[in-house]
Amino acid sequence: MRDARGSAARPATLLLAALLVLAALSGCDGGRKGQIAERGRSPFTGQFARPAPVLAVKIDNAAQARPHTGLGAADIVYVEQVEGGLSRMLAVFSSRLPATVGPVRSARESDLDLLRQFGRPALAYSGVQSRLRSTVDAAPLYPLPPAEAPRAYFRGTRHPAPHNLYVRPEAALRAAPDASDAPDIGFRFGAAPPGGKPTARQTVRYPSAGFVFTWSATDKRWLVAMDGTPARTTDGGRLGAATVVVQYTRVRPSRFHDVLGSVTPFTETVGSGRAVVLRDGKAYETRWSRPGAGGGTTFTTTDGDRMKFAPGPVWVVFAAR
């Protein structure tokens, strides 16, 4: 015969255990990482996503490299100036992994500072010049050029060499099994703040490259054009983003140069300055701040509040101030 006291105590015990679990989840500080995991949202896009490793891919953006493949699946796309006033991109993947990404090109010194905020991410790239190799090896990341993950790369037939190197993200991450899951890098998502200037189009120009972001009320995103041509992918159609950040910073000469002697620009992502955040068909004047390479970047409105991004992919375009 079942003990009456045990039967009565069991529901109380279960209730107490449930309350303790709830307290552990919702109480007790727990830090930003714990709160993000509880919400089940990506700290990169503000959308539902499971915790997953970070893979950054250095993307070729010469005219001969377009259209790109897999770029539409990136959580974040960073755009930076390189030699000759041209541009390249650093695409960050975590929420979604496309089958293929590319074309892949060589990394730059600026990428190393930028990636410090992601913990220890994996970085897929075609290579670096010899003088930068030791700096890459010492950086807190998993360097994955073809020599380190040969099964993850292949040469395509759509573009001429050297614009035809592609990476398979899942295979690349198998070579970096301990890559960090997506951390809090300072982005905040939610309802738009008051104010903002109605904006249909925003242009960012480099000496030999240009980007135009056009608001589409139908698609509820900013459509991307590169060098005057609508940007499309081979596997996902027109490129666009829910939020675009034009981050004004110092772009200075580095100690490196390409084979033609052109100096490689260094984009400073540690510091502070002005930024324009585009969301929901409006432009918001903001300030960005990143005191150290190990931390993320915060964006604040002119009122001093944290700027909220629209949930979805984010493009960050670094422009010379």
Image (cartoon, rainbow, N blue to C red):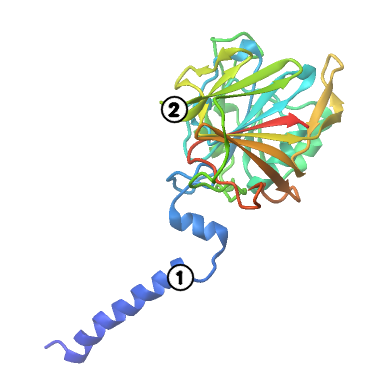
Q: Residue 265 versus residue 312: which sits nearer the camera?
A: 312
Residue 244 placement, left or right of 257: left
Q: Position of residue 29 (x, y in %)?
A: 54, 68
Residue 141 visible in the shown view: no
Q: Earlier in the sequence, mark 2 or mark 1?
A: 1
Q: Quadrant of the N terminus?
A: bottom left
Density class for disc 1 (Cα within 10 Å; few <14, some 14-19, many ≥20) is few
Q: Position of residue 55 (x, y in %)?
A: 58, 37
Q: Residue 198 versus residue 87: which sits nearer the camera?
A: 198
Residue 142 visible in the shown view: yes
- Label 1 sits on what residue type? Ala
Density class for disc 2 (Cα within 10 Å; few <14, some 14-19, many ≥20) is few
Q: Secondary structure at mark 1?
A: helix
Q: Position of residue 46 (x, y in %)?
A: 49, 45
- Label 2 sits on what residue type? Ala
The residue furthest left is 1
Query: For the residues marked 2 and 1, what is the alpha-carbon distance in whole angstroms?
Result: 42 Å
**Residue 321 sits in which quadrant?**
top right
Q: Which residue is mark 1?
A: 24
Q: Residue 142 versus residue 276: which sits nearer the camera?
A: 276
